[in-house]
Amino acid sequence: MDNQKVLQDVTKEIELASSQEELQIVKVTYLGKKGRITELLKSLKDLSLDEKKSKGAEINLLREKVQALFEVKLKDLKILDINSKLNTEFLDITFPPPEVSAAKVHPISKTFDDVVSIFGSMGYAIAEGPDIETDFFNFSALNIPEDHPAREMQDTFYIADKDEKGKPLVLRTHTSPVQIRTMLNQKPPIKIIAPGRTYRCDSDSTHSPMFHQVEGLFINENANMGDLKGTLIEFCKQFFEVQDLKVRFRPSYFPFTEPSAEMDIAYEIIDNKLQIGKGDKWLEILGCGMVNPVVLENCKLDTSKFQGFAFGMGLDRITMLKHGLTDIRSFFNGNLNWLAKHGFSLGEY
Ligand code: PHE
C-alpha cells in the first residue's frame, strides 16, 4: 500500500519537473540519504526475517522502477535543453567569416631559435635560471659587493619580498647569475649558453625595461681570449649571414671578468637601409672577458686548474641589426599588424 502511494507521488512529481535542477531535487527527496524510498528500506530492520525478505524485494523493485523513471525523464530534459539552445544560439552562416591571418613567429623568438642552433652546433648546452634572483646570484657572487659603484652600472628593479638573508629580491639585470648557478652545480668542462629575459629600469628607442640576453660560459683548463674572440666572430658571421664581417673588440670593465672587452659591429645606412658588417658606424652588441678568478673561487672552482671565458649579448640589439628595425619598443607593444609584417611564417624556418 505504502509502496503504491510512493510510486504514484514520485511519478507525478517527475512529470511536473521542468528542468534538470528540479528533477534532481525530486530525486533527492526519494532516493537521497533521507529520501522516502531510502527510509522505507531502513524501516525493514524492525521486521522478522521472512518479512524482511518479501518486503525488501518489493521495495527494491520499487526503487528500480523509480530509477528508470528518473533516467527517462533526464533524457527528455536534456533533449529539451539542446533544442532550446539551438533556438537561441542562432548562427547566421551567410555572415562573412572574421579575418584570420596565419600565425607568425616573433622576430625575438626566431633569434632565440637561431642563437640556440648556432651555439648548439659549437657544442654549447642550454642552462636556465629564474627571472627573480637573489642579491647573491645577481651581484655578490659576480664580484659586485654591496656599495660597489658597479651596482649603479645597472638600474635595478628591486622586489619588496626578501631572500633568506633579508636582502630584497631583484629582477635579474643580466643573464650572468646563470653562470654562478651553473658553476655551483656542474663540474668543468662547462660549455653553456643561457638565453632569457632580463630587466633594467631604462626605456627609450634602444632600451626596454624588459629585454633579452644570452649568456655564454666556457670553462676548462686552457680556454683563452683568442678562443673567445673566435667563438663570437664565428657566431656573428653565421647569425648575420655575412662572411666578411667588420667587428672590433674594445677594452672594457666588468667586475666578473678580467680582462674585459666589448664587441661592436660595424654598420652603415645606404638608401635608408641598414647594412651590417661594413661602414664606419659601430653598434655595441655584447660584453665579454675571461672569468675573474674571484668569481671562480666564489663558485668553489680550483683556480690553479681552471679558467674560462664568458659573454653576455643583447638579443634585442642583434635582432634589430639583422632586420633593420630601429625601435626596440616595437617588439613588445603587442601590435598584430607589426607582427604580420615583421614576423616569420613557419615555412621560413
Ligand atoms: N652581464 C654583462 C651585462 O649585462 C655582460 C657580460 C657577460 C660581460 C659576461 C662579461 C661577461 O652588461
Image (cartoon, helix red, strand yellow):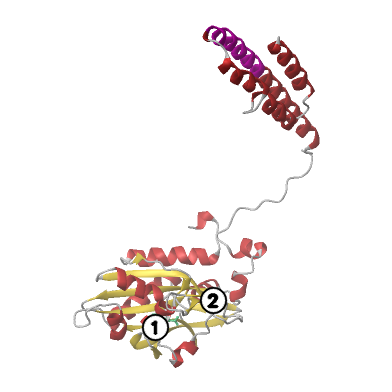
Residue 66 in picture, x, y percent from top left: 66, 17
Looking at the image, which residue sits at the far left? 304
Could you tell me which residue is drawn at 40 percent across and 65 percent down?
116
* Residue at image point 76% right, 32% down: 86
Q: Which residues are magenta?
A: 50-68
Residue 287 appears in the figure: yes
Count of numbered labels shown in the rendering: 2
Q: What residue is shown with label 2? A: 159
Q: Nearer the viewer, residue 208 or 231?
A: 208
Element assignment for label 2: strand
Percent x, y of residue 171: 51, 75
91 and 53: which one is in front? 53
The reply to whether the magenta stretch includes residue 64 is yes
Q: In this rendering, would 214 be left or right of 78?
A: left
Q: Which residue is mark 1?
A: 140
Ligand 1 is located in which of the four quadrants?
Answer: bottom left
Residue at the spot 53% in from the left edge and 83% down from the top edge: 268
Drawn side of residue 155 relative to residue 179, left or right: right
